[in-house]
Amino acid sequence: MKKAVIVTFDKFTDVDVFLPWDLLNRVKFRDKAFQVKIVGTETSHKSVCGLDLTMHGLIEACNDADFVFFASGPGTRDVIKDQSYLDRFQLNPDKQIICSMCSGALIIAALGHLKGLSATTYPTAFDALRSYGVDVIEDTHLVTHGNIGTAAGCLAAVDLIGWAIEKMYDEKVKADVIASVLPIGQGQVCIYP
């Protein structure tokens, strides 16, 4: 069974959790055993728009997941300063796909997984990401290195999650999932049971 985990925290950006959640859950139409969870440090976290979201588990669930996705939002600036938070992650980019949306890249950098790599993030986080010694690519929405992917701009989640789905499965599963959310005329029609 493959497992995907979306990491959230207080003051997360709503679309950066819910769009990946929706896309990843579309994989279940092809692999009923595929599991997607939203995790945090508390039983619920409040989004930047004020929505309370109940967690499926704690962030330690990331440590044995196939795919770990770090959401973004103003809350990233708090968690990257909390060493006890960071110490709870034992991620391995040789065995896991590790991704971030916008300022979620700050968490991957704080964990040391962007050392010597280039990455992208939202413009308001460029300088903070550079402070970790990361080569920030400002003019592209998706940067990948091996099993690590960073994306910038909320709708870049479509390409980022598509990249991760292809790494976990194949091009066909990715194409089916992405086509199912494209505007009419830009993708093919998918019929689900």
Image (tube, grey):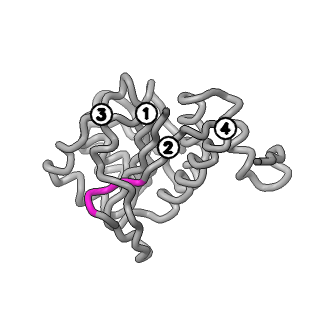
Question: Helix or strand or loop: what does disc 3 sit on?
Answer: loop
Is label 4 or label 1 in front? Answer: 4
The residue beneath circle 1 is 66
C-alpha separation, residue under disc 4 versus residue under disc 1: 17 Å
Q: Is residue 121 magenta?
A: no
On residue 91, the disc is 3
Question: Helix or strand or loop: what does disc 1 sit on?
Answer: loop
C-alpha separation, residue under disc 2 versus residue under disc 4: 12 Å
Return the disc, 2 or 1, that comes first in the chain's sequence.
Answer: 2
Q: Name the image quarter holding residue 55.
A: bottom left
Q: Amino acid at mark 2?
A: Gln
Binning the other alpha carbons within 10 Å of mark 1 as few (below 14), some (14 to 19) or many (20 upward) gives: many
The secondary structure that most of the magenta stretch takes on is strand
Seen at 77% across and 55% down, the residue is 183
On residue 83, the disc is none
Return the disc, 4 or 3, that comes first in the chain's sequence.
Answer: 4
Is label 4 or label 3 in front? Answer: 4
Q: Are marks 4 and 3 in contact (CB under 8 Å)?
A: no
The residue beneath circle 2 is 35
